[in-house]
Amino acid sequence: MLYIELCDVYEKLEKISSKIGKTEILANFFKKCETNVLRQAVLLTLGTIFLPFENRELGVALKLAMRAISKATGFKIDEIEKLYVKYGDLGKVAEICVSQRKQKTFFKKDLTIEYVFNQLREIGFAEGEGSQDKKISILAGLLNFSQPKEARYLIRTVLEELRVGVAEGIVRDAIVMAFFKAGEKEKAVEAVEFAYNILSDYGEVAVIAKEQGIEGLKNVKPILGRPMQVMLGVKAESIEEVVRRHGKVLAEFKYDGLRLIIHKKENKIWLFTRRQEDVTAQFPDIVEEVLKNIKAKECIIEGECWPIDPQTKNPLPFQKLSQRIHRKYDIDKMVKEVPVQLNLFDIVYVDGKNLFHLPLRERREILKSVVNESEKIKFAESIVSSDIKELEEFYNKALQLKQEGIMLKNLESEYKFGRHVGGWYKIKPVMETLDVVIVGAEWGEGARSKWLSSYLFAVRDPDTGEYLTCGMGGTGLTEEQFEAMTEMLKPLIVKEEGKFVHIKPKIVVEVSYQEIQVSPKYSSGYALRFPRIERIRFDKGPEEADTIDRLIELFKSQGKKG
Ligand code: AMP
């Protein structure tokens, strides 16, 4: 299938703003794709070349893309820069340069989706000495054969700025619309989501939907070594509320650390974070203990790993664990300096069997039969009770031991990915916070003029991938943190307007606030009043930030409380 057909789809998507309109366009396109290119076509509509768990990036910056355009079209770099200043979109600039090419190519070749996808992956594989030239040469090679419209979208794809307003939500609905009858919609959405949560690849999911239908999707099994999505808790108002709803519940400590999803296949272990990062190399101590103490041949178990003070058994500050997560060398030294404990709380797969649909009660039994406790590996501290007083005492004990709070879990609930009422509930003392993405910032005044000291916050629309702004502020950071934040944000600046800079959405911060107000000033339609940064969420990527729906939910719930 030709790449130009995909570019026509991009163009249509760009012109239409309605979500249902975009879904229809994509569904028609997916239907038309031959099975052998469907996966690549779906990923390209999301602008994805490497999946998050591949730990690889294209690594194409603006300057490099400009050099490739120059090489392919004969335009000089300063001409390209001028056009870029004028249009603010290098894709558009590439389109112009290709349409007025100063050097002609001798052969003509039609770009296919398969060829483009594979060449783009080659760009990401170029590493080490000479890699910049190699990237330029592959990209220029593609531009050589491009029509102007193809050049526009190629450049936007490599810069990760496709701008067609499509993210996972719309792709999911388009897969459902393309391959299932209207009457099966509800079941199909559920099955597509289930398979995606396991495979983390909408391309593969689309192929299974097309070839094997709902049953095929429902039977998808985890691939050991490939991270999945995880189940999370919703915030509960109180212990009473959860007991009223579910009666007897499982209460567990909510440890303040790093979620580890542990995959075991024979004697190979992988450790993944909630963000699907592979942190196996950073925790050789955990790998060793897991190998010694898991009896199953293959399994996926989950727990929280936290830095422990060997004397008091209390947690060390989370910062200590961050140091371990980000350390690429001297790992053995870090293992000694920051000892950790792992508290296990779930199992979702064992020896070829999915356990997602079993109630927690049974999963826990299986977990206990598969793992031996050891000095470093323990089951999460827990009680089962419907007695409010007993549960409150347990909560106080967790807080006294300096953990974050407790989780209350419905013992009859299945393992459902994401946050759902009916499964897990969090009880912790702080007010509800929001995890927002920084999409802009302002240089400070006076003594702060060397720092980006005020930040524009945004929540995410999971359908379109758009970031909708919801407030601005800089309270909560120390001087050191301002400096560190400025260093993190500087490479992400995409445009400057006086003192204000637009920032590529990458950094997530947890903010508290006094209240949420309706506000026409921000694109979400709401504003956080007196936002305060509680911490930088190194453990979360922008796609995991809170959504517009959650912001609206919080706005409504504060209304209820008067
Ligand atoms: P939050 O990010 O506040 O929604 O909290 C969810 C996180 O709590 C999970 O991703 C885990 O890392 C962590 N956690 C700590 N203890 C537990 C537990 N006993 N059960 C489930 N999650 C836990």
Image: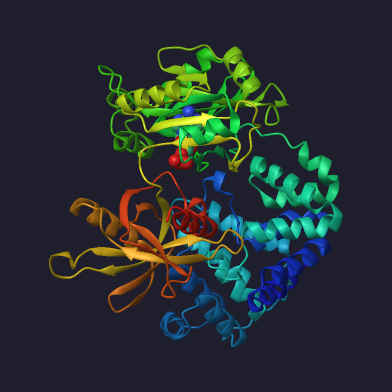
Residue 360 versus residue 181 in the image, above or below: above
In front: 160, or 14? 14
Q: Is residue 287 above or below residue 186?
A: above
Q: Quadrant of residue 440?
A: bottom left
Q: Could you tell me which residue is drawn at 49 percent across and 70 percent down?
A: 65
Looking at the image, the residue that sits furthest to the front is 562
Nearest to the observer: residue 291 or residue 344: 344
Residue 148 x, y percent position in the rendering: 64, 80
What's the image's color scheme?
rainbow
Left or right of 201, for residue 490: left
Question: Based on the displayed image, in which of its 4 quarters is residue 507 positioned?
Answer: bottom left
Q: Is residue 200 visible?
A: yes
Residue drawn at (39%, 47%), measured in percent from left and top? 537
**Residue in view at x 60 percent, y 57 percent:** 48
Q: Residue 239 appears at what percent x and percent y? A: 47, 32
Residue 325's x, y, as percent?
38, 37
In the image, taking residue 560 as reference, residue 358 lies left or right, namely: right
Number of marks in the rendered image: 0
**Residue drawn where x is 34% and y is 56% of the image:** 513
Q: Is residue 458 left or right of residue 150?
A: left
Task: Say which of 175 and 110 sits in front.
Answer: 175
Image quarter hosting the C terminus = bottom left
Does any portion of residue 259 appear in the rendered image? no
Return the x and y of residue 409 as percentages of the image width and height: 55, 29
Residue occupying the far left of the picture: 447
Identify the image quadrant of the N terminus. Answer: bottom right
Q: Quadrant of residue 376?
A: top left
